Image (spheres, grey):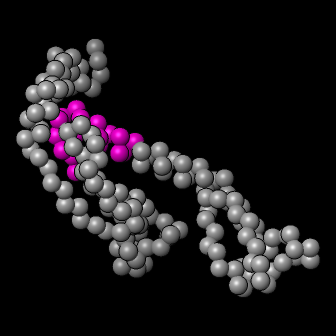
Amino acid sequence: MAAGLNQRLSDLELAQTLDDRDHRGGDGDQPEVLRHHDAGEDRQREEQQRQRDAWVTIQRAHAIANGVYVAAVNRVGRELPMGSSGSGGAAAASEGAGGIRFWGRSFVADPFGRVLARASDSEEELLVVECDLSAVERVRRDWPFLRDRRIDAYADLLRRVRD
């Protein structure tokens, strides 16, 4: 990129950047740098966002369906593939190095699925959340989602193939 360009361009945006001091075109209106993202990058990020949203939704649903607090834990960073060089730790992995990227954002949800605390998507963190365990009994008594299950309807789940 041109010297003097001090704006970092995001992969998620179509950015037109002009360094006013040094890089004007002859008529002063033409950009020196044009950054256009790859549509494939967007599709991949959209899929990751859908997966993350589904993960959050199912964890919150577990809290609601069971009337309990849920601590949903997810690490951050990238795990390198087996046999790759380097220390193998998530911190040692760089973007584009392959392996699995973990999106973090661990959280604690109450028995109604409300998120009480959420961790970072980029830094290791420890969440300390006060949980009122008497709320579990109240929720189960006042909104008996767990009690009213139709266990008799679950028999077919124990079979591999339904007759």
Q: What residue is rendered at 61% in x and 65% in y?
A: 10
Q: Is residue 63 above or below residue 36?
A: above
Q: What residue is rendered at 31% in x and 56% in y?
A: 118
Q: Is residue 98 above or below residue 6?
A: above
Horizontally, is 41 left or right of 87 in the view? right
Q: What residue is rendered at 65% in x and 59% in y?
A: 13
Among the 4 quarters of the image, the one containing residue 101: bottom left
**In the foreground, 121 or 77:** 121
Please report the bounds of the magenta region as a residue range.
54-72
- Percent position of residue 121, x then y: 39, 61
Among the 4 quarters of the image, the one containing residue 154: top left
- Percent position of residue 95, x then y: 50, 69
Q: Does residue 91 appear in this view?
A: yes
Task: Say which quadrant the C terminus sits in.
Answer: top left
Horizontally, is 4 left or right of 67 in the view? right
Among the 4 quarters of the image, the one containing residue 78: bottom left
Q: Does residue 88 appear in this view?
A: no
User: Is residue 71 located in the magenta-colored stretch of the structure?
Assistant: yes
**In the foreground, 18 or 64:** 18
- Percent position of residue 96, x then y: 53, 68
User: Is residue 25 located in the magenta-colored stretch of the structure?
Assistant: no
Horizontally, is 52 left or right of 7 in the view? left
Task: Say which quadrant the N terminus sits in.
Answer: bottom right
Most prominent secondary structure in the magenta stretch?
A: helix
- Percent position of residue 126, x then y: 24, 65
**In the foreground, 65 or 4:** 4
Q: What residue is rendered at 40% in x and 77% in y?
A: 92
Q: Is residue 59 above or below residue 2?
A: above
